[in-house]
Amino acid sequence: DAGVIQSPRHEVTEMGQEVTLRCKPISGHNSLFWYRQTMMRGLELLIYFNNNVPIDDSGMPEDRFSAKMPNASFSTLKIQPSEPRDSAVYFCASSRNTGGATKNIQYFGAGTRLSVL
Amino acid sequence: GQSLEQPSEVTAVEGAIVQINCTYQTSGFYGLSWYQQHDGGAPTFLSYNALDGLEETGRFSSFLSRSDSYGYLLLQELQMKDSASYFCAPPRGTIFGAGTRLFVKA
């Protein structure tokens, strides 16, 4: 398997522009997570989906952020309009959630490094 | 609510043993996982404890005490390449500790 695939790897944009980050989870995984990582705040969960349904979006910072998962093999994270404080590395991860006390190992994509000027 | 606490930094020398602690408060506890992240890289899974005791995977071991809400990651025979950040997390993984940055010196 190719692992979790994120695109683009790097994105540089200007304040006010729309940014769309894309993620293809590992085939057969039923949970998908979007994280943001900065030096100041560490690794923060933004939203996670289970079977394509958003379960917890309490980490989404504000209405400028939205995420979709139209099917089991694709998800997007959109920021509109973008601001300099959104500059961070955004990770997508997927896992096979079987419930109960199981590993539920999360496999992370390589991340998208976003710079908003 | 859920929270995890780890030391922010640990420094050790090559060949030594280092222990990275994690204390947690979680609802519906299902065990504790550990992840490693090198600078510029993505977190990767290292180890998981569902029950009390020690799990060994090569040079890395992880320990859990559910009664103490405490776990640790033990790294033996440290190598320079072990310099990275280490995160503890519940297996549902919706939160991660702030991470412990390990510096291995020659």
Image: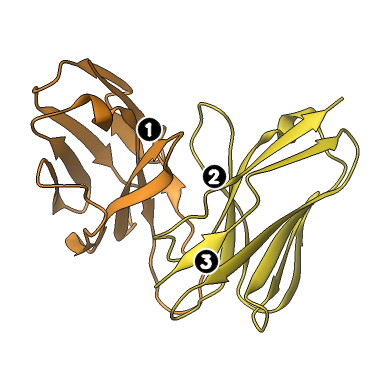
Q: Chain of mark 3?
A: A
- Residue labelled with disc 1: A111
Give the answer, above or below, for where A87 lies relative to B28. above
Few, some or many residues within 10 Å of mark 3 (<14, 14–19, 20+): many
Image location of residue A46, percent across then percent down:
28, 50
- Residue labelled with disc 3: A103
Image location of residue B85, percent across then percent down:
61, 40
Q: Amino acid at mark 3?
A: Lys
Residue B64 visible from this viewpoint: yes
Foreground pick, A74 / A58: A58
Q: Chain of mark 2?
A: B
The residue shown at (18%, 59%) is A52
- Residue labelled with disc 2: B44
Few, some or many residues within 10 Å of mark 2 (<14, 14–19, 20+): some
Q: Colour of chain B?
A: yellow
Colour scheme: by chain
Q: Chain of mark 1?
A: A
Asked if residue A47 lies left or right of residue A101, the reply is: left
Q: Secondary structure at mark 1?
A: loop
Image location of residue A19, percent across then percent down:
15, 28
Image location of residue B37, percent across then percent down:
57, 38
Asked if residue B26 lies left or right of residue A93, the reply is: right
Residue B90 visible from this viewpoint: no
Q: Secondary structure at mark 3?
A: loop
Q: Which mark is residue A28?
A: none
Give the letter of the orange chain. Answer: A
